[in-house]
Image (cartoon, rainbow, N blue to C red):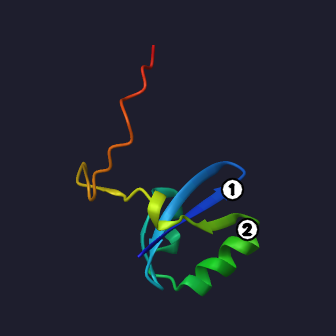
Amino acid sequence: MKLVRVVAPHFVAGFESDGTVRRTAPILKTLRGWTDNRARNYLARKGWRASVVPEQIAFPFVQNGTPRNQINIGPPIDSR
């Protein structure tokens, strides 16, 4: 499974694919079930950029409120 980052003028989102788009951010739900080729062509027509996130820095989607593979990325940022 690979994580793909999509950059558009009004959003940045991602989806997971294994040759078929399996999981998406809500804004990309149209792509669910599409082949990589179909998704790539659609993104190109829209003028959006897509790139595969290298596995060593890919953050998995959260499922049911719990990260699938929890990664410690440091202390929380103070929002004050």
Residues under labels 1 and 2: Cα distance? 8 Å
Q: Which quarter of the rendered picture does the N terminus lie within? A: bottom left
Q: Nearer the viewer, mark 1 or mark 2?
A: 1
Amino acid on which disc 1 is placed: Ala
Q: Which quarter of the rendered picture does the C terminus lie within? A: top left
Compared with 42, 78 (above or below) is above
Q: Which residue is at the front of the view, 69 or 63? A: 69
Compared with 5, 19 (above or below) is below
Residue 16: percent from left, percent from top: 44, 70
Find numbered disc 1 in the image and state the secondary structure of the residue it sits on.
strand
Q: Which residue is mark 1?
A: 8
Compared with 60, 45 (above or below) is below
Check whether the beta carbons of the residues at disc 1 and disc 2 lie within 8 A of each other.
Answer: yes
Q: What residue is drawn where x is 66% and y is 76%?
A: 42
Q: Quadrant of residue 46?
A: bottom right
**Mark nearer the N terminus (1 vs 2):** 1
Mark 1, residues whose alpha carbon is within 10 Å: few (<14), some, or many (≥20)?
Answer: few
Find numbered disc 2 in the image and state the secondary structure of the residue it sits on.
helix
Q: Which residue is at the front of the view, 2 or 34? A: 2
Mark 2, residues whose alpha carbon is within 10 Å: few (<14), some, or many (≥20)?
Answer: few
Q: Which mark is residue 21?
A: none
Residue furthest out toward the top: 80
Amino acid on which disc 2 is placed: Lys
Q: Which residue is mark 2?
A: 46
Q: What residue is drawn where x is 73% and y is 73%?
A: 44
Residue 27: percent from left, percent from top: 52, 57
> Is residue 41 found left or right of 17 in the rendered image?
right
Q: Which residue is at the front of the view, 69 or 62? A: 69
Residue 43: percent from left, percent from top: 67, 71
Q: Quadrant of residue 36?
A: bottom right
Q: What residue is drawn where x is 59% and y is 78%?
A: 39
